[in-house]
Protein backbone atom coordinates (compact mmCIF):
# COMPACT_ATOMS: atom_id res chain seq x y z
CA UNK A 1 0.00 0.00 0.00
CA UNK A 2 2.88 2.34 0.87
CA UNK A 3 4.65 1.41 -2.35
CA UNK A 4 1.45 2.20 -4.28
CA UNK A 5 1.02 5.58 -2.57
CA UNK A 6 4.69 6.45 -3.01
CA UNK A 7 4.73 5.47 -6.67
CA UNK A 8 1.56 7.47 -7.31
CA UNK A 9 2.98 10.52 -5.53
CA UNK A 10 6.29 10.32 -7.41
CA UNK A 11 4.48 9.92 -10.76
CA UNK A 12 2.24 12.95 -10.11
CA UNK A 13 5.19 15.10 -9.02
CA UNK A 14 7.37 14.01 -11.94
CA UNK A 15 4.53 14.74 -14.40
CA UNK A 16 4.03 18.21 -12.90
CA UNK A 17 7.76 19.03 -13.03
CA UNK A 18 8.19 17.82 -16.62
CA UNK A 19 5.03 19.58 -17.80
CA UNK A 20 6.15 22.85 -16.22
CA UNK A 21 9.77 22.61 -17.36
CA UNK A 22 9.54 21.87 -21.11
CA UNK A 23 5.85 21.83 -22.02
CA UNK A 24 6.07 21.88 -25.81
CA UNK A 25 8.89 19.38 -26.15
CA UNK A 26 7.49 16.96 -23.58
CA UNK A 27 4.04 17.29 -25.18
CA UNK A 28 5.44 16.23 -28.55
CA UNK A 29 7.31 13.27 -27.08
CA UNK A 30 4.42 12.02 -24.91
CA UNK A 31 1.85 12.26 -27.71
CA UNK A 32 4.28 10.51 -30.06
CA UNK A 33 4.97 7.67 -27.64
CA UNK A 34 1.74 7.16 -25.76
CA UNK A 35 -1.23 8.57 -27.71
CA UNK A 36 -1.66 5.44 -29.83
CA UNK A 37 -0.82 2.81 -27.18
CA UNK A 38 -3.11 4.31 -24.56
CA UNK A 39 -6.01 3.96 -26.99
CA UNK A 40 -5.17 0.30 -27.45
CA UNK A 41 -5.05 -0.18 -23.67
CA UNK A 42 -8.44 1.51 -23.37
CA UNK A 43 -9.84 -0.76 -26.06
CA UNK A 44 -8.49 -3.81 -24.24
CA UNK A 45 -9.92 -2.62 -20.94
CA UNK A 46 -13.34 -1.89 -22.45
CA UNK A 47 -13.47 -5.26 -24.20
CA UNK A 48 -12.79 -6.93 -20.87
CA UNK A 49 -15.62 -4.95 -19.28
CA UNK A 50 -18.02 -5.66 -22.13
CA UNK A 51 -20.38 -8.49 -21.20
CA UNK A 52 -20.38 -11.58 -23.45
CA UNK A 53 -24.18 -11.29 -23.75
CA UNK A 54 -25.82 -7.89 -23.45
CA UNK A 55 -29.01 -9.33 -21.90
CA UNK A 56 -31.05 -6.61 -20.20
CA UNK A 57 -28.27 -4.08 -20.97
CA UNK A 58 -29.00 -4.42 -24.67
CA UNK A 59 -30.80 -1.05 -24.99
CA UNK A 60 -28.04 0.65 -23.03
CA UNK A 61 -25.25 -0.69 -25.25
CA UNK A 62 -27.18 -0.18 -28.50
CA UNK A 63 -27.80 3.47 -27.51
CA UNK A 64 -24.16 3.81 -26.44
CA UNK A 65 -22.71 2.44 -29.68
CA UNK A 66 -25.22 4.21 -31.95
CA UNK A 67 -24.48 7.54 -30.25
CA UNK A 68 -20.76 6.86 -30.30
CA UNK A 69 -20.88 6.17 -34.04
CA UNK A 70 -23.07 9.15 -34.89
CA UNK A 71 -21.15 11.64 -32.75
CA UNK A 72 -17.76 10.44 -33.99
CA UNK A 73 -18.76 10.57 -37.67
CA UNK A 74 -20.29 14.04 -37.34
CA UNK A 75 -17.31 15.33 -35.33
CA UNK A 76 -14.79 14.00 -37.84
CA UNK A 77 -16.80 15.46 -40.72
CA UNK A 78 -16.66 18.98 -39.23
CA UNK A 79 -13.04 19.76 -40.26
CA UNK A 80 -13.77 18.36 -43.74
CA UNK A 81 -16.86 20.53 -43.97
CA UNK A 82 -14.80 23.52 -42.80
CA UNK A 83 -12.41 22.97 -45.67
CA UNK A 84 -15.06 22.91 -48.40
CA UNK A 85 -17.80 25.23 -47.09
CA UNK A 86 -17.32 28.92 -46.38
CA UNK A 87 -19.84 29.64 -43.67
CA UNK A 88 -19.56 32.69 -41.41
CA UNK A 89 -17.97 32.19 -38.00
CA UNK A 90 -21.35 32.48 -36.27
CA UNK A 91 -22.76 29.55 -38.27
CA UNK A 92 -19.80 27.41 -37.19
CA UNK A 93 -20.44 28.31 -33.58
CA UNK A 94 -24.08 27.21 -33.96
CA UNK A 95 -22.94 23.93 -35.55
CA UNK A 96 -20.47 23.36 -32.70
CA UNK A 97 -23.08 24.21 -30.06
CA UNK A 98 -25.52 21.79 -31.71
CA UNK A 99 -22.97 18.97 -31.67
CA UNK A 100 -22.20 19.65 -28.01
CA UNK A 101 -25.92 19.64 -27.18
CA UNK A 102 -26.41 16.28 -28.93
CA UNK A 103 -23.47 14.94 -26.90
CA UNK A 104 -25.09 16.11 -23.66
CA UNK A 105 -28.46 14.66 -24.71
CA UNK A 106 -26.79 11.30 -25.45
CA UNK A 107 -25.14 11.32 -22.02
CA UNK A 108 -28.47 12.08 -20.32
CA UNK A 109 -30.18 9.22 -22.18
CA UNK A 110 -27.38 6.85 -21.13
CA UNK A 111 -27.68 7.98 -17.52
CA UNK A 112 -31.46 7.41 -17.61
CA UNK A 113 -31.00 3.93 -19.07
CA UNK A 114 -28.38 3.09 -16.45
CA UNK A 115 -30.62 4.47 -13.70
CA UNK A 116 -33.36 2.08 -14.80
CA UNK A 117 -31.00 -0.84 -14.17
CA UNK A 118 -29.67 0.53 -10.92
CA UNK A 119 -32.73 1.64 -9.01
CA UNK A 120 -30.93 2.18 -5.69
CA UNK A 121 -29.46 5.50 -6.81
CA UNK A 122 -31.28 8.68 -7.83
CA UNK A 123 -29.70 10.32 -10.85
CA UNK A 124 -32.56 12.66 -11.72
CA UNK A 125 -30.33 15.66 -10.89
CA UNK A 126 -28.43 14.97 -14.10
CA UNK A 127 -31.26 16.42 -16.25
CA UNK A 128 -31.22 19.98 -14.84
CA UNK A 129 -27.41 19.84 -14.66
CA UNK A 130 -27.12 18.82 -18.31
CA UNK A 131 -29.61 21.50 -19.34
CA UNK A 132 -27.66 24.16 -17.43
CA UNK A 133 -24.39 23.03 -19.05
CA UNK A 134 -26.14 23.04 -22.45
CA UNK A 135 -27.25 26.63 -21.81
CA UNK A 136 -23.68 27.70 -21.03
CA UNK A 137 -22.54 25.79 -24.11
CA UNK A 138 -24.82 27.89 -26.32
CA UNK A 139 -23.37 31.08 -24.84
CA UNK A 140 -19.79 29.97 -25.59
CA UNK A 141 -19.57 26.70 -27.56
CA UNK A 142 -15.81 26.96 -27.95
CA UNK A 143 -15.37 27.11 -24.17
CA UNK A 144 -17.42 23.92 -23.81
CA UNK A 145 -15.11 22.15 -26.26
CA UNK A 146 -12.08 23.48 -24.38
CA UNK A 147 -13.55 22.24 -21.10
CA UNK A 148 -13.87 18.80 -22.70
CA UNK A 149 -10.14 18.89 -23.52
CA UNK A 150 -9.27 19.57 -19.88
CA UNK A 151 -11.90 17.38 -18.19
CA UNK A 152 -11.39 14.27 -20.30
CA UNK A 153 -7.97 13.33 -18.82
CA UNK A 154 -9.47 13.41 -15.34
CA UNK A 155 -12.07 10.76 -16.24
CA UNK A 156 -9.23 8.20 -16.24
CA UNK A 157 -8.75 8.86 -12.52
CA UNK A 158 -12.41 7.97 -11.98
CA UNK A 159 -11.93 4.67 -13.84
CA UNK A 160 -8.93 3.94 -11.64
CA UNK A 161 -10.97 4.68 -8.53
CA UNK A 162 -13.61 2.14 -9.62
CA UNK A 163 -10.97 -0.45 -10.51
CA UNK A 164 -9.17 -0.08 -7.17
CA UNK A 165 -12.50 -0.42 -5.36
CA UNK A 166 -13.14 -3.65 -7.23
CA UNK A 167 -9.75 -5.34 -7.06
CA UNK A 168 -7.74 -3.62 -4.28
CA UNK A 169 -10.25 -2.00 -1.93
CA UNK A 170 -7.58 -1.67 0.78
CA UNK A 171 -5.75 0.84 -1.46
CA UNK A 172 -8.76 3.07 -2.00
CA UNK A 173 -8.16 5.42 0.92
CA UNK A 174 -4.50 5.90 -0.04
CA UNK A 175 -5.51 6.60 -3.63
CA UNK A 176 -8.14 9.14 -2.66
CA UNK A 177 -5.72 10.87 -0.29
CA UNK A 178 -3.22 11.14 -3.15
CA UNK A 179 -5.99 12.62 -5.33
CA UNK A 180 -6.53 15.33 -2.72
CA UNK A 181 -3.01 16.58 -3.51
CA UNK A 182 -3.89 16.99 -7.18
CA UNK A 183 -5.67 20.37 -6.76
CA UNK A 184 -2.76 21.53 -4.59
CA UNK A 185 -0.22 20.61 -7.28
CA UNK A 186 -2.40 22.19 -9.96
CA UNK A 187 -2.65 25.36 -7.88
CA UNK A 188 1.15 25.39 -7.49
CA UNK A 189 1.64 24.98 -11.26
CA UNK A 190 -0.86 27.78 -11.93
CA UNK A 191 0.77 30.04 -9.32
CA UNK A 192 4.25 29.29 -10.71
CA UNK A 193 3.29 29.94 -14.35
CA UNK A 194 0.57 32.59 -14.09
CA UNK A 195 3.09 35.35 -14.81
CA UNK A 196 5.20 33.29 -17.23
CA UNK A 197 5.82 34.60 -20.72
CA UNK A 198 3.66 32.95 -23.37
CA UNK A 199 5.33 30.21 -25.38
CA UNK A 200 6.71 31.09 -28.77
CA UNK A 201 4.25 29.75 -31.35
CA UNK A 202 5.95 30.90 -34.54
CA UNK A 203 6.49 27.25 -35.45
CA UNK A 204 3.33 25.64 -36.89
CA UNK A 205 3.65 22.65 -34.58
CA UNK A 206 4.05 24.74 -31.44
CA UNK A 207 1.13 26.88 -32.63
CA UNK A 208 -1.07 23.77 -32.90
CA UNK A 209 -0.16 22.69 -29.37
CA UNK A 210 -0.91 26.10 -27.84
CA UNK A 211 -4.19 26.30 -29.80
CA UNK A 212 -5.21 22.86 -28.57
CA UNK A 213 -4.69 24.07 -24.99
CA UNK A 214 -6.91 27.11 -25.57
CA UNK A 215 -4.35 29.89 -26.12
CA UNK A 216 -6.59 31.61 -28.67
CA UNK A 217 -9.70 31.45 -26.50
CA UNK A 218 -7.92 32.61 -23.36
CA UNK A 219 -5.45 35.22 -24.62
CA UNK A 220 -5.10 36.79 -21.18
CA UNK A 221 -3.71 33.53 -19.78
CA UNK A 222 -0.09 32.60 -20.46
CA UNK A 223 0.06 29.86 -23.09
CA UNK A 224 2.90 28.32 -21.05
CA UNK A 225 0.45 27.82 -18.19
CA UNK A 226 -2.27 26.39 -20.46
CA UNK A 227 0.02 23.92 -22.23
CA UNK A 228 1.64 22.84 -18.95
CA UNK A 229 -1.67 22.21 -17.18
CA UNK A 230 -3.06 20.32 -20.17
CA UNK A 231 0.11 18.28 -20.54
CA UNK A 232 0.15 17.47 -16.82
CA UNK A 233 -3.43 16.16 -17.02
CA UNK A 234 -2.64 14.23 -20.21
CA UNK A 235 0.36 12.58 -18.54
CA UNK A 236 -1.87 11.47 -15.65
CA UNK A 237 -4.35 10.13 -18.20
CA UNK A 238 -1.67 8.15 -20.05
CA UNK A 239 -0.23 6.89 -16.76
CA UNK A 240 -3.59 5.54 -15.62
CA UNK A 241 -4.38 3.76 -18.88
CA UNK A 242 -0.90 2.44 -19.69
CA UNK A 243 0.46 1.66 -16.22
CA UNK A 244 -2.14 1.59 -13.45
CA UNK A 245 -5.16 -0.13 -15.00
CA UNK A 246 -3.24 -2.93 -16.77
CA UNK A 247 -1.42 -3.69 -13.49
CA UNK A 248 -4.61 -3.67 -11.45
CA UNK A 249 -7.03 -5.22 -13.92
CA UNK A 250 -7.19 -9.00 -13.63
CA UNK A 251 -6.88 -10.91 -16.93
CA UNK A 252 -5.58 -7.79 -18.69
CA UNK A 253 -2.67 -9.64 -20.25
CA UNK A 254 -4.46 -12.98 -20.43
CA UNK A 255 -5.24 -13.57 -24.10
CA UNK A 256 -5.71 -17.34 -23.76
CA UNK A 257 -9.48 -17.20 -23.26
CA UNK A 258 -11.38 -17.25 -26.54
CA UNK A 259 -13.99 -14.52 -26.45
CA UNK A 260 -17.52 -15.37 -27.44
CA UNK A 261 -19.73 -13.38 -29.82
CA UNK A 262 -17.99 -11.12 -32.32
CA UNK A 263 -14.23 -11.38 -32.65
CA UNK A 264 -12.70 -9.15 -30.04
CA UNK A 265 -9.23 -10.54 -30.71
CA UNK A 266 -9.43 -9.21 -34.26
CA UNK A 267 -10.23 -5.76 -32.88
CA UNK A 268 -7.12 -5.88 -30.70
CA UNK A 269 -4.95 -6.95 -33.64
CA UNK A 270 -6.38 -4.12 -35.76
CA UNK A 271 -5.65 -1.83 -32.79
CA UNK A 272 -1.97 -2.85 -32.79
CA UNK A 273 -1.76 -2.15 -36.53
CA UNK A 274 -3.35 1.29 -36.02
CA UNK A 275 -0.85 2.11 -33.24
CA UNK A 276 2.07 1.20 -35.52
CA UNK A 277 0.55 3.22 -38.37
CA UNK A 278 0.20 6.15 -36.00
CA UNK A 279 3.89 5.94 -35.07
CA UNK A 280 4.83 5.82 -38.75
CA UNK A 281 2.55 8.82 -39.41
CA UNK A 282 4.06 10.76 -36.52
CA UNK A 283 7.58 10.02 -37.80
CA UNK A 284 6.70 11.12 -41.34
CA UNK A 285 4.51 14.18 -40.70
CA UNK A 286 3.98 14.83 -37.03
CA UNK A 287 1.81 17.95 -37.36
CA UNK A 288 -0.74 16.45 -39.78
CA UNK A 289 -0.88 13.12 -37.94
CA UNK A 290 -1.39 15.01 -34.67
CA UNK A 291 -4.34 16.92 -36.18
CA UNK A 292 -5.89 13.71 -37.55
CA UNK A 293 -5.27 11.84 -34.29
CA UNK A 294 -6.89 14.47 -32.08
CA UNK A 295 -9.93 14.58 -34.37
CA UNK A 296 -10.43 10.82 -34.44
CA UNK A 297 -9.55 10.51 -30.75
CA UNK A 298 -12.99 11.92 -29.92
CA UNK A 299 -14.17 8.30 -30.29
CA UNK A 300 -12.21 7.16 -27.22
CA UNK A 301 -13.36 10.24 -25.29
CA UNK A 302 -16.97 9.33 -26.02
CA UNK A 303 -16.47 5.59 -25.42
CA UNK A 304 -15.41 6.27 -21.85
CA UNK A 305 -18.90 7.56 -20.93
CA UNK A 306 -20.92 4.31 -21.22
CA UNK A 307 -18.20 2.18 -19.65
CA UNK A 308 -17.80 4.58 -16.74
CA UNK A 309 -21.58 4.57 -16.24
CA UNK A 310 -21.50 0.78 -16.21
CA UNK A 311 -18.75 0.85 -13.60
CA UNK A 312 -20.75 3.13 -11.27
CA UNK B 1 14.69 -9.43 -21.96
CA UNK B 2 11.23 -8.39 -23.17
CA UNK B 3 11.26 -5.37 -20.85
CA UNK B 4 14.70 -4.39 -22.11
CA UNK B 5 13.52 -4.56 -25.71
CA UNK B 6 10.45 -2.51 -24.86
CA UNK B 7 12.56 0.16 -23.17
CA UNK B 8 14.95 0.23 -26.13
CA UNK B 9 12.01 0.59 -28.52
CA UNK B 10 10.54 3.45 -26.50
CA UNK B 11 13.94 5.18 -26.35
CA UNK B 12 14.21 4.85 -30.13
CA UNK B 13 10.74 6.34 -30.62
CA UNK B 14 11.53 9.07 -28.11
CA UNK B 15 14.70 9.96 -29.97
CA UNK B 16 12.73 10.02 -33.22
CA UNK B 17 10.12 12.33 -31.69
CA UNK B 18 12.77 14.77 -30.43
CA UNK B 19 13.81 15.30 -34.05
CA UNK B 20 10.33 16.64 -34.65
CA UNK B 21 10.76 19.33 -31.98
CA UNK B 22 13.32 21.10 -34.12
CA UNK B 23 11.44 20.54 -37.39
CA UNK B 24 10.17 23.70 -39.07
CA UNK B 25 6.44 23.29 -39.60
CA UNK B 26 4.63 26.10 -41.42
CA UNK B 27 1.97 27.91 -39.45
CA UNK B 28 -1.53 27.81 -41.01
CA UNK B 29 -2.67 30.97 -42.72
CA UNK B 30 -5.16 33.04 -40.75
CA UNK B 31 -8.78 32.44 -41.71
CA UNK B 32 -10.82 34.83 -43.81
CA UNK B 33 -10.87 38.32 -42.35
CA UNK B 34 -14.11 39.54 -40.84
CA UNK B 35 -15.30 42.98 -39.90
CA UNK B 36 -14.79 44.06 -36.27
CA UNK B 37 -16.51 46.72 -34.21
CA UNK B 38 -13.75 48.89 -32.79
CA UNK B 39 -15.49 51.75 -31.02
CA UNK B 40 -18.93 52.87 -29.89
CA UNK B 41 -19.63 56.58 -29.70
CA UNK B 42 -22.08 59.38 -30.59
CA UNK B 43 -22.47 60.70 -34.12
CA UNK B 44 -23.97 64.02 -35.08
CA UNK B 45 -25.01 64.68 -38.67
CA UNK B 46 -25.19 68.40 -39.33
CA UNK B 47 -26.48 69.88 -42.60
CA UNK B 48 -24.50 73.08 -43.13
CA UNK B 49 -25.11 75.51 -46.01
CA UNK B 50 -21.76 77.23 -45.45
CA UNK B 51 -19.49 74.26 -46.23
CA UNK B 52 -18.67 72.97 -49.75
CA UNK B 53 -17.18 69.59 -48.93
CA UNK B 54 -18.20 66.84 -46.52
CA UNK B 55 -16.03 66.58 -43.44
CA UNK B 56 -15.67 63.95 -40.74
CA UNK B 57 -14.74 65.69 -37.51
CA UNK B 58 -13.35 63.59 -34.72
CA UNK B 59 -12.05 64.73 -31.35
CA UNK B 60 -8.45 64.13 -30.28
CA UNK B 61 -9.57 61.91 -27.38
CA UNK B 62 -11.73 59.73 -29.61
CA UNK B 63 -8.96 59.38 -32.15
CA UNK B 64 -6.63 58.16 -29.42
CA UNK B 65 -9.31 55.76 -28.20
CA UNK B 66 -9.70 54.42 -31.74
CA UNK B 67 -5.95 54.04 -32.10
CA UNK B 68 -5.80 52.14 -28.81
CA UNK B 69 -8.64 49.90 -29.98
CA UNK B 70 -6.83 49.26 -33.27
CA UNK B 71 -3.61 48.46 -31.43
CA UNK B 72 -5.40 45.94 -29.27
CA UNK B 73 -7.19 44.18 -32.11
CA UNK B 74 -6.69 40.39 -32.26
CA UNK B 75 -4.12 40.52 -29.52
CA UNK B 76 -6.39 41.18 -26.59
CA UNK B 77 -10.02 40.14 -27.16
CA UNK B 78 -11.61 39.67 -23.74
CA UNK B 79 -13.25 36.41 -22.74
CA UNK B 80 -16.51 38.29 -22.22
CA UNK B 81 -16.33 39.55 -25.80
CA UNK B 82 -16.26 35.99 -27.12
CA UNK B 83 -19.40 34.93 -25.24
CA UNK B 84 -22.70 34.82 -27.16
CA UNK B 85 -22.80 37.71 -29.57
CA UNK B 86 -25.74 36.28 -31.46
CA UNK B 87 -29.44 36.59 -30.67
CA UNK B 88 -30.12 33.00 -31.82
CA UNK B 89 -27.61 31.45 -29.45
CA UNK B 90 -28.65 33.72 -26.59
CA UNK B 91 -32.28 32.73 -27.17
CA UNK B 92 -31.53 29.01 -27.16
CA UNK B 93 -29.34 29.40 -24.06
CA UNK B 94 -32.21 31.24 -22.34
CA UNK B 95 -34.72 28.49 -23.17
CA UNK B 96 -32.33 25.77 -21.95
CA UNK B 97 -31.62 27.70 -18.77
CA UNK B 98 -35.35 28.10 -18.16
CA UNK B 99 -35.82 24.34 -18.62
CA UNK B 100 -32.86 23.65 -16.33
CA UNK B 101 -34.24 25.78 -13.52
CA UNK B 102 -37.71 24.23 -14.01
CA UNK B 103 -36.39 20.66 -13.84
CA UNK B 104 -34.16 21.60 -10.91
CA UNK B 105 -37.24 22.92 -9.10
CA UNK B 106 -39.15 19.67 -9.66
CA UNK B 107 -36.12 17.65 -8.56
CA UNK B 108 -35.63 19.76 -5.44
CA UNK B 109 -39.33 19.49 -4.57
CA UNK B 110 -39.11 15.71 -4.83
CA UNK B 111 -35.80 15.57 -2.98
CA UNK B 112 -37.11 17.76 -0.15
CA UNK B 113 -39.43 14.91 0.91
CA UNK B 114 -36.33 12.90 1.71
CA UNK B 115 -33.46 14.07 3.94
CA UNK B 116 -31.20 16.20 1.75
CA UNK B 117 -27.82 14.57 1.36
CA UNK B 118 -24.51 16.33 0.83
CA UNK B 119 -24.46 15.34 -2.86
CA UNK B 120 -27.90 16.86 -3.44
CA UNK B 121 -26.84 20.11 -1.78
CA UNK B 122 -23.73 20.30 -3.97
CA UNK B 123 -25.80 19.68 -7.13
CA UNK B 124 -28.39 22.28 -6.09
CA UNK B 125 -25.63 24.83 -5.43
CA UNK B 126 -23.95 24.04 -8.77
CA UNK B 127 -27.21 24.49 -10.71
CA UNK B 128 -27.85 27.75 -8.87
CA UNK B 129 -24.38 29.04 -9.77
CA UNK B 130 -24.81 28.02 -13.43
CA UNK B 131 -28.27 29.62 -13.51
CA UNK B 132 -26.94 32.90 -12.10
CA UNK B 133 -23.99 32.90 -14.53
CA UNK B 134 -26.22 32.06 -17.49
CA UNK B 135 -28.85 34.63 -16.55
CA UNK B 136 -26.16 37.30 -16.12
CA UNK B 137 -24.70 36.47 -19.52
CA UNK B 138 -28.13 36.50 -21.18
CA UNK B 139 -29.12 39.81 -19.56
CA UNK B 140 -25.85 41.50 -20.46
CA UNK B 141 -25.51 39.94 -23.91
CA UNK B 142 -29.14 39.63 -24.96
CA UNK B 143 -30.34 42.37 -27.29
CA UNK B 144 -33.56 43.35 -25.55
CA UNK B 145 -35.43 46.13 -27.36
CA UNK B 146 -34.15 48.29 -30.22
CA UNK B 147 -30.41 49.02 -30.15
CA UNK B 148 -29.36 52.41 -28.76
CA UNK B 149 -29.59 55.22 -31.29
CA UNK B 150 -32.13 53.46 -33.54
CA UNK B 151 -34.97 55.83 -32.66
CA UNK B 152 -32.75 58.92 -33.02
CA UNK B 153 -31.81 57.96 -36.58
CA UNK B 154 -35.45 57.51 -37.55
CA UNK B 155 -35.81 61.29 -37.44
CA UNK B 156 -32.83 61.88 -39.73
CA UNK B 157 -34.69 62.55 -43.00
CA UNK B 158 -37.19 64.88 -41.29
CA UNK B 159 -34.41 66.76 -39.48
CA UNK B 160 -32.36 66.85 -42.64
CA UNK B 161 -35.18 68.41 -44.68
CA UNK B 162 -35.59 71.03 -41.97
CA UNK B 163 -31.85 71.72 -41.78
CA UNK B 164 -31.65 70.42 -38.21
CA UNK B 165 -28.85 68.34 -36.71
CA UNK B 166 -29.45 64.70 -35.69
CA UNK B 167 -27.48 62.99 -32.91
CA UNK B 168 -27.40 59.26 -32.15
CA UNK B 169 -25.19 56.35 -31.15
CA UNK B 170 -22.90 54.83 -33.74
CA UNK B 171 -20.10 52.29 -34.03
CA UNK B 172 -16.83 52.40 -35.90
CA UNK B 173 -16.46 49.16 -37.76
CA UNK B 174 -13.28 48.13 -39.53
CA UNK B 175 -14.09 46.08 -42.63
CA UNK B 176 -11.66 44.04 -44.74
CA UNK B 177 -10.27 45.62 -47.90
CA UNK B 178 -12.04 44.84 -51.18
CA UNK B 179 -9.42 43.91 -53.81
CA UNK B 180 -11.05 45.66 -56.81
CA UNK B 181 -12.65 48.62 -55.05
CA UNK B 182 -10.82 51.81 -54.06
CA UNK B 183 -10.82 52.44 -50.29
CA UNK B 184 -13.70 54.62 -49.09
CA UNK B 185 -15.53 55.54 -45.91
CA UNK B 186 -19.16 54.41 -45.75
CA UNK B 187 -21.79 55.65 -43.30
CA UNK B 188 -24.65 53.20 -42.77
CA UNK B 189 -27.72 54.68 -41.09
CA UNK B 190 -30.79 52.69 -39.93
CA UNK B 191 -33.74 53.53 -42.15
CA UNK B 192 -37.38 52.52 -41.94
CA UNK B 193 -39.33 53.87 -44.99
CA UNK B 194 -42.68 53.42 -43.26
CA UNK B 195 -41.72 55.30 -40.11
CA UNK B 196 -39.79 57.95 -42.03
CA UNK B 197 -42.80 58.44 -44.35
CA UNK B 198 -45.13 58.89 -41.36
CA UNK B 199 -42.85 61.53 -39.98
CA UNK B 200 -42.90 63.53 -43.18
Image: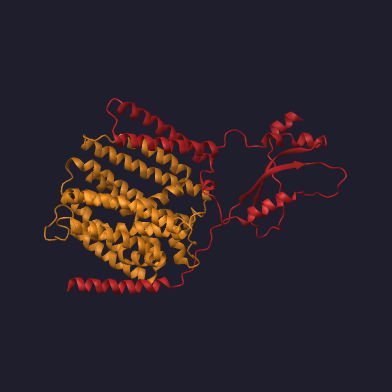
* Colour seen for chain A: orange
Residue A236 in the image: state x and y as whole percent: 31, 57
Q: Is residue A127 above or below residue A286?
A: above
Displayed quadrant of residue A6:
bottom left
What's the residue at 73%, 31% (across, down)?
B197
Give the camera-side residue of A212 and A51.
A212
B127 lies left or right of B11: right
What's the residue at 38%, 50% (across, down)?
A148
Displayed quadrant of residue B121:
top left
Give the camera-side residue of A15 and A268.
A15
**The C terminus of chain B appears in which quarter of the rendering?**
top right
Considering every residue shown, the one lying at the far top of the view is B113
Residue A68 in the image: state x and y as whole percent: 31, 49
Q: Is residue B113 above or below residue A33?
A: above
- Residue B28 appears in the rendering: yes
Q: Is residue B79 above or below residue B17?
A: above
Q: How many marks?
A: 0
Residue A248 in the image: state x and y as whole percent: 18, 56
Considering every residue shown, the one lying at the far left of the view is A257
- Residue A303 appears in the rendering: no
Residue B25 in the image: state x and y as whole percent: 46, 69
**The N terminus of chain B appears in which quarter of the rendering?**
bottom left
What's the residue at 69%, 53% (across, down)?
B64
* Colour seen for chain B: red
A187 lies left or right of A270: right
Q: Is residue A135 above or below residue A163?
A: above
Give the camera-side residue of A83 and A284.
A284
Amino acid sequence: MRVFGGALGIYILAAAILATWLPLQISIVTVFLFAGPHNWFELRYFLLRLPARFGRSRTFFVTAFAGLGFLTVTYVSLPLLYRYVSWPNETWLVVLATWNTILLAWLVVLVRLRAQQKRTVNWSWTIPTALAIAALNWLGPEFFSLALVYVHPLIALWFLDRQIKRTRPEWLNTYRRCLCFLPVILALVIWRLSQATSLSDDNGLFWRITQHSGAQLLPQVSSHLLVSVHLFLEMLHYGVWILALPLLGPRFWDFSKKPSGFSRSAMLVVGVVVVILLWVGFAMDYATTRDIYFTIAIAHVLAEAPFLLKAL
Amino acid sequence: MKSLLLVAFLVFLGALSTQIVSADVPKPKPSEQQSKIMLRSKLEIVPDEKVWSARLQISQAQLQELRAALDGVDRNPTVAASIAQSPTRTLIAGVLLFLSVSFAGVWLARASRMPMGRKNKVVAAAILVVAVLGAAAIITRGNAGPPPGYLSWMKLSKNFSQGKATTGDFMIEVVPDQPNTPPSVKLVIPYNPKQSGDDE
